[in-house]
Amino acid sequence: MWRRILASILVVIGALLLLLSSFGWWADRYFLNSERFTSNANKILDEEEVQDALAFAITQQISEQSGRNLSLAEPVIQTIVRQIVISDPFQKIFDAAVLRAHHAAVEGGAREMVLNLSEAVDNVRSALRPIAPNLAKKIPKGERSRSRSSARPSSTPSTTSRTP
């Protein structure tokens, strides 16, 4: 009888260890591995809906950070931002930003993450300069435009804007 109880206990312990090791393997493979994490982020960035949302968010941030009313120019700015978002140079900017954010999250101690895409804002200004120089002057320099996500103990992370 005690052998049957001991065998049952060992089966339960073995199942729990298998479950924990499976989770550890998954976390290591899909979350803790920086290259795979960045690759998955790039797959998400390749989706048209994500590109549109990112272009909209960057456009809104440019408009807010400019301190001027750019509502009439926002469709033009958003079209340029959309083209920049799908470009290879933006991919490199995005990869570097995601990699830095991933390292900060995995290595611990990060209570706030900043996804710095300021070079993208500078690219928008550069693209606008030949066709609308006055509008390009209204767009702030890239280092003033950042998105951040703050970890809050009782809520989900939120995205906000800030000027350093």
Image (cartoon, rainbow, N blue to C red):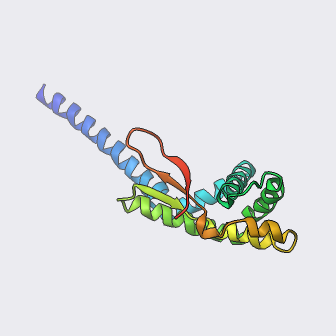
112 above or below 135?
above
Of residues 28 and 162, the one drawn nearer to the viewer in this rendering: 162
Percent x, y of residue 105: 43, 58
Estimate the x, y position of residue 107 in percent, counting from the top left: 38, 63
Quadrant assignment, res 162: bottom right
Q: Give x and y (percent) for residue 148.
A: 52, 56
Quarter of the figure that contains the N terminus: top left
- Front position in the image: 16 or 66: 66
In the rendered image, residue 35, in percent from the top left (x then y), is placed at: 53, 66
Q: Look at 60% across and 57% down and name the residue there.
A: 41
In the rendered view, tell whether residue 152 sits above or below residue 138.
Answer: above
Tell me if residue 156 can be seen.
yes
Residue at left offset 47%, top offset 55%: 31
Q: Nearer the viewer, residue 11 or 32?
A: 32
Q: Is residue 14 left or right of residue 58?
A: left
From the viewer's perspective, is 131 left or right of 162? right
The image quarter containing residue 128 is: bottom right
Q: Residue at x 85, y 68 (%)?
A: 132
* Extreme residue in the top direction: 1
Say how many tags the image has: 0
